[in-house]
Amino acid sequence: MNIGQASKASGVSAKLIRYYEGIGLIPEAGRTASGYRVYTPQDVNILRFVRRARTLGFGIERIRHLVGLWRDRNRASAEVKRIALEHVRELEAKIAELRAMSDTLQDLANACHGDDRPDCPILRDLESPGSGSAAAACCTDATAAGEHAIRP
Amino acid sequence: MNIGQASKASGVSAKLIRYYEGIGLIPEAGRTASGYRVYTPQDVNILRFVRRARTLGFGIERIRHLVGLWRDRNRASAEVKRIALEHVRELEAKIAELRAMSDTLQDLANACHGDDRPDCPILRDLESPGSGSAAAACCTDATAAGEHAIRP
DNA sequence: CCTTGACCTTCCCATCTTTGGAAGGTCCAT
DNA sequence: ATGGACCTTCCAAAGATGGGAAGGTCAAGG
């Protein structure tokens, strides 16, 4: 099995397979006499494992760790679970961050009439956060102090 | 006002101010005879605008667009709103993606007893998605087809 | 045997934003 | 004049992935 076939079988691009090998995430593939990489079905399993882990948002270093545990028949499932839950926490933190961005922007957009006129609560917020007329603007005073740009 | 003072006043690091200038996001700062960058309060306003937009997750190119609209007294608020809502859509898409990752992992972690034993539904899913014993595994058949790795 | 096309190899570059460092010049106060 | 805090430019790293160039290899068909 050459790299193209391994790529199709695993869903990982050939480019990426070489990259993963380069950073030591997967073991070095065998080579033919002419230098072509050769893959076994077991190699394809590792590639699929990595792809699935990437799909779940794991970073490379964590995947390296998971691959190690996967290949260790004596691993404790507690360790795997710990890594997974740590990742869940990070995902939730990121989600909360994006949620806050999205909600703030949605509020600002709701307050913007969106016509030909130049007046725009969105730009007013960007210019001077918290001082705009957007919904909920009256409640956010944590960042308001010192943010009152005095503009002509 | 030199770059350090502008940095403190705007909350944008000096490094980043130089970068923003380099990519043309903000106008080139004035210079003293000896080459130091000089900033006016108006320059600081632009920096604050950029920082706020970054906080809301806008990418540089979109901020470039927004800065242009901000400085255009004849802009239509509809254009600003359009950009904002486009960004909201992207944020929501990203949130949905992370939400799916997090929920899947949480389900898998719930199914994992997390003790000394090696048996682990999380690793089983990574090895062969959809065939594990995780909660809800019985309901996700969209990705299950063709994913049944036949392993010895 | 030779050509053709599909595949493989390595190496370099780009993304995107932010941070870090090195080497060297400038400003201000002592 | 010396020290320390600041400034300058240039280079590199990070994450993961894609793109491309230049050149070698394989298999099929003439």
Image: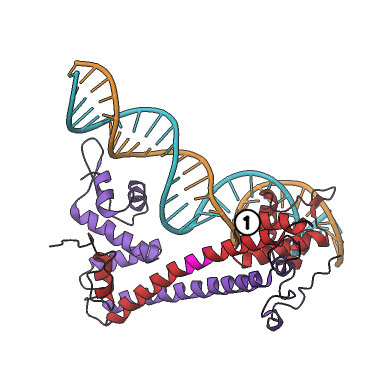
Chain colours: A purple, B red, C orange, D cyan
Q: Residue at x 23, y 54 (%)?
A: A43
Which residue corresponds to mark 1?
B62
Percent position of residue A48, x then y: 27, 59
Work out which quarter of the rendered image holds the C terminus of chain A and state it: bottom right
Percent position of residue A103, x then y: 58, 74
Q: Residue at x 31, y 76 (%)?
A: B108
Look at the magenta stretch and give its main secondary structure. Answer: helix
Q: Determine the image quadrant of residue A141.
A: bottom right
Work out which quarter of the rendered image holds the N terminus of chain A and state it: top left
Note whether D24 is above or below B148 in the view shown: above
Q: Nearer the viewer, residue A33 or B90?
A: B90
* Residue B126 seen anywhere in this rendered image of the structure: yes
Residue closest to the far front: A115
> Does A124 appear in magenta?
no
Percent position of residue A147, x then y: 76, 73
Q: Determine the image quadrant of residue B3.
A: bottom right
In the displayed structure image, the side of residue B58 where residue B33 appears, left or right: right
Percent position of residue A69, x then y: 27, 69
- Bounds of the magenta segment: B90-95
